[in-house]
């Protein structure tokens, strides 16, 4: 019988390659995923894996890759230091190449910090992809983390009578407990929270639901202050003066989300100010 020996170097090489490939693939997929709130609300998946699973795969494979690098450095320290010393002595003949490398490395750091081109375009493409997902019908939750609210909390915030909630679900043969979350109910019945919300919003007296959408969601965070003013039939200059009086400096083209984050507010808080509700 042939004795099988375990070759540690071969194992490390294969593990390095596989963890790099997993990290690369999961990183590419995460670049194209929707924003977290949209992914949770619509139960977004790719290859039947949700965003959290892809993120966990990316983090874990990257961690393995990092640990292998540390192990490799530790295990080959003498060889590595000898190689570095030898290469440093050769750098004298690569002064121009070294200068260009340092300049490019510095530019990458600065461009990433200040969103300079061409890296700014890469980030813009990522934002465009996420906005594409968010702009799809029913993609935006009526409020942040709506899927984590209990039935009672969800009904109260959107002014949906609990009896209406119960009837809509019982008509489909679904039951629920008032302390269950929207996500738990949706998962048990194999639908997304967005689909569950769509079922509830088909009631004939939909005024309360529409009001809740206007107030709590509808993708306001991505719109400009001028867009919200037009929707609320408000004069944008008057609104900017009102915001300035509250200590909020902004221009009509500023994004609602950006202004809100700058002043430690939720986008919905800023929208309500513009609508005259605060």
Image (cartoon, rainbow, N blue to C red):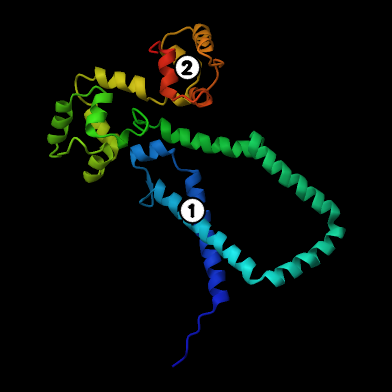
- Looking at the image, tell me whether mark 2 or mark 1 is earlier in sequence order: 1
Q: Position of residue 51 (x, y in %)?
A: 41, 46
Q: Residue furthest right?
A: 93
Q: Position of residue 63 (x, y in %)?
A: 52, 57
Query: SS class of the residue under badge 2?
Result: helix
Q: Quadrant of the N terminus?
A: bottom left
Q: Quadrant of the C terminus?
A: top left
Residue denoted by label 2: 227
Q: Position of residue 29 (x, y in %)?
A: 47, 48
Question: Mark 2 near mark 1, Cβ–Cβ under 8 Å?
Answer: no
Residue pictured at 85% horizontal, 54% vertical: 95
Classed neighbour count for the residue bearing mark 1: other residues with Cα under 10 Å, few (<14), some (14–19), many (≥20): some
Q: Which residue is nearer to you in this view: 22 or 68?
A: 68
User: Could you tell me if residue 118 is visible in this image?
Assistant: no
Is 112 on the left or on the right of 238, as rendered? right
**Above or below, comparing residue 245 to residue 181 in the picture:** above
Is 90 on the left or on the right of 21, as rendered? right
Residue pictured at 50% horizontal, 84% vertical: 5
Residue pictured at 68% horizontal, 43% vertical: 108
Q: Position of residue 186 (x, y in %)?
A: 25, 40
Q: Nearer the viewer, mark 2 or mark 1?
A: 1
**Above or below, comparing residue 9 to residue 266 in the picture:** below
Residue denoted by label 1: 59
**Above or below, comparing residue 54 to residue 254 in the picture:** below
Is 114 on the left or on the right of 102, as rendered? left
């Amino acid at each position: 019988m042939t004795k099988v020996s375990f070759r540690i170097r071969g194992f490390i090489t294969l593990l390095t390659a596989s963890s790099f490939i997993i990290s690369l693939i999961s990183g590419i997929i995460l670049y194209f995923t929707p924003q977290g709130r949209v992914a949770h609300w619509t139960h977004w998946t790719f290859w039947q894996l949700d965003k959290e699973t892809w993120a966990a795969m990316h983090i874990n494979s990257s961690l393995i890759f990092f640990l292998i690098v540390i192990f490799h450095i530790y295990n080959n320290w003498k060889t590595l230091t000898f190689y570095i010393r030898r290469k440093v002595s050769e750098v004298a003949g690569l002064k121009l190449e070294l200068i260009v490398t340092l300049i490019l490395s510095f530019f990458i750091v600065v461009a990433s910090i200040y969103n300079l081109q061409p890296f700014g375009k890469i980030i813009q493409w990522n934002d465009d992809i996420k906005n594409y997902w968010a702009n799809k019908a029913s993609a935006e939750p009526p409020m942040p983390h709506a899927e984590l609210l209990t039935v009672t909390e969800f009904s109260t915030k959107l002014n949906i009578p609990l009896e209406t909630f119960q009837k809509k679900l019982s008509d489909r043969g679904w039951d629920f407990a008032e302390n269950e979350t929207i996500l738990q109910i949706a998962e048990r019945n194999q639908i997304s929270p967005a689909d569950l919300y769509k079922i509830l919003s088909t009631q004939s007296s939909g005024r309360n639901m529409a009001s809740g959408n206007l107030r709590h969601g509808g993708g306001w965070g991505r719109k400009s202050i001028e867009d919200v003013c037009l929707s609320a039939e408000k004069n944008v200059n008057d609104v900017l003066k009102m915001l300035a009086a509250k200590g909020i400096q902004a221009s009509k083209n500023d994004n609602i989300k950006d202004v809100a984050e700058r002043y430690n507010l939720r986008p919905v808080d800023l929208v309500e100010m513009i609508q005259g509700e605060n």
